[in-house]
Image (cartoon, rainbow, N blue to C red):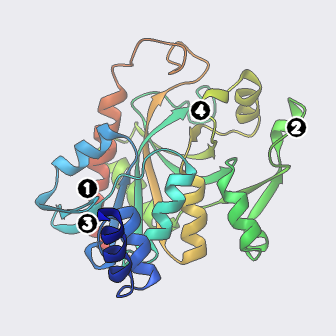
């Protein structure tokens, strides 16, 4: 009887909100109006805590923290790990007044290439190879994306038999103006630590094999993450300005491989602190884009 009463009350409430508000309330536990135009999306608990602790005049609405960073009003929402979670976040944000969405967190790095990236560096992705499983579903649903985006044959086929996965890899890109603001601010603060690189997004954190790493090196990919491809893709689809600023957590295939080492590099946390400082110092310019 009590459960029936609860269900009836919920159904009564749903009659007074539209589908857009229903989606944001389900996933963000707040109304669309409680999300600001600039949204910062950390992934991990550590980075979320660091960013939220920087907020002035902080208040929380559901899963959304609102406040001021460097005098600019922002919302901070933890996206959680992986492209499916990021896609849900973007579906929510397109139903709000958000128009600039900034991802900040960790990524993995491939050393020994053009930029010789290392833990402690901060990177701005120039592009993201959609090596994940979520992006192809959106491209299948929104076929116009297949003509808008550049693509390549899956380079992993050069190193292993592609018995599964995507034969074609599409390439998504962040908003160039936002990325340039972050990069230029980074150069002014940490000239030797800021780098603009190509990135590959993968679903399977535990499947970064030697064949996979050889593939990345063959196409000069210097960063690996699990969220940016769908962030950039849905930014293009929904006309939202997106970008990412990332610090390296590990270097797969080296002594600082997250999955095969018990040692955390001393520069890992300073690297993400640099990324946060760059982002905060860039907000005044980002606001005007």
Q: Which residue is mark 2?
A: 162
Calculate the distance from the C-alpha at mark 2 to the C-alpha at mark 4: 18 Å
Mark closer to the chain start, 1 or 4: 4
Q: Visible in this render: residue 261?
A: yes
What element does badge 3 sit on? Answer: strand
Q: Residue furthest left?
A: 57
Left or right of 78? Residue 81 is right
Q: Residue furthest front?
A: 1
Q: Are marks 3 and 4 in contact (CB under 8 Å)?
A: no
Left or right of 262? Residue 129 is right
Position of residue 166 measured from the top left corner of the image (x, y, whole percent): 81, 49
What element does badge 2 sit on? Answer: loop
Q: Which residue is mark 1?
A: 280
Q: Which residue is mark 4?
A: 205
Calculate the distance from the C-alpha at mark 1 to the C-alpha at mark 3: 10 Å
Mark closer to the chain start, 3 or 2: 3
Calculate the distance from the C-alpha at mark 3 to the C-alpha at mark 2: 43 Å
Q: Are marks 1 and 3 in contact (CB under 8 Å)?
A: no
Q: Which residue is mark 3?
A: 74
How many other residues sit within 10 Å of disc 1, few (<14), some (14-19) or many (≥20)? many
Mark closer to the chain start, 1 or 3: 3
Left or right of 173? Residue 277 is left
Quadrant where the N terminus sits is bottom left
Residue 58 or residue 19, whichever sits in front: 19
Mark closer to the chain start, 3 or 4: 3
Position of residue 273 measured from the top left corner of the image (x, y, whole percent): 28, 39
């Amino acid at each position: 009887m009590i459960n029936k009463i609860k269900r009836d009350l919920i159904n009564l409430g749903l009659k007074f909100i539209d589908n857009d508000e229903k989606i944001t309330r389900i996933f963000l536990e707040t109304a669309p109006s409680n999300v600001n135009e600039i949204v910062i999306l950390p992934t991990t608990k550590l980075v979320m805590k660091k960013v939220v602790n920087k907020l002035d005049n902080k208040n929380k609405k559901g899963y959304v923290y609102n406040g001021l960073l460097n005098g600019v009003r922002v919302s901070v929402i933890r996206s959680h790990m992986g492209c499916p979670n990021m896609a849900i976040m973007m579906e929510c944000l397109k139903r709000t007044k958000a128009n600039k969405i900034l991802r900040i967190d960790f990524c993995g790095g491939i050393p020994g290439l053009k930029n010789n990236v290392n833990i402690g560096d901060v990177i701005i992705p120039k592009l993201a190879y959609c090596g994940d499983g979520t992006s192809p579903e959106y491209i299948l649903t929104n076929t116009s994306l297949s003509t808008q985006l550049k693509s390549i044959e899956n380079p992993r086929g050069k190193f292993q038999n592609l018995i599964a996965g995507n034969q074609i890899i599409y390439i998504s890109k962040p908003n160039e103006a936002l990325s340039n603001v972050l990069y230029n601010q980074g150069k002014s603060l940490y000239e030797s630590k800021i780098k603009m690189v190509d990135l590959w997004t993968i679903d399977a954190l535990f499947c970064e094999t030697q064949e996979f790493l050889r593939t990345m090196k063959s196409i000069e990919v210097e960063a690996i993450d699990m969220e940016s491809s769908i962030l950039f893709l849905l930014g293009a689809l929904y006309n939202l300005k997106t970008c990412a600023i990332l610090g390296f957590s590990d270097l797969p295939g080296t002594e600082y491989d997250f999955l095969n080492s018990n040692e955390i590099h001393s520069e890992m946390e300073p690297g993400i602190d640099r990324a946060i400082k760059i982002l905060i110092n860039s907000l005044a310019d980002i606001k005007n884009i």
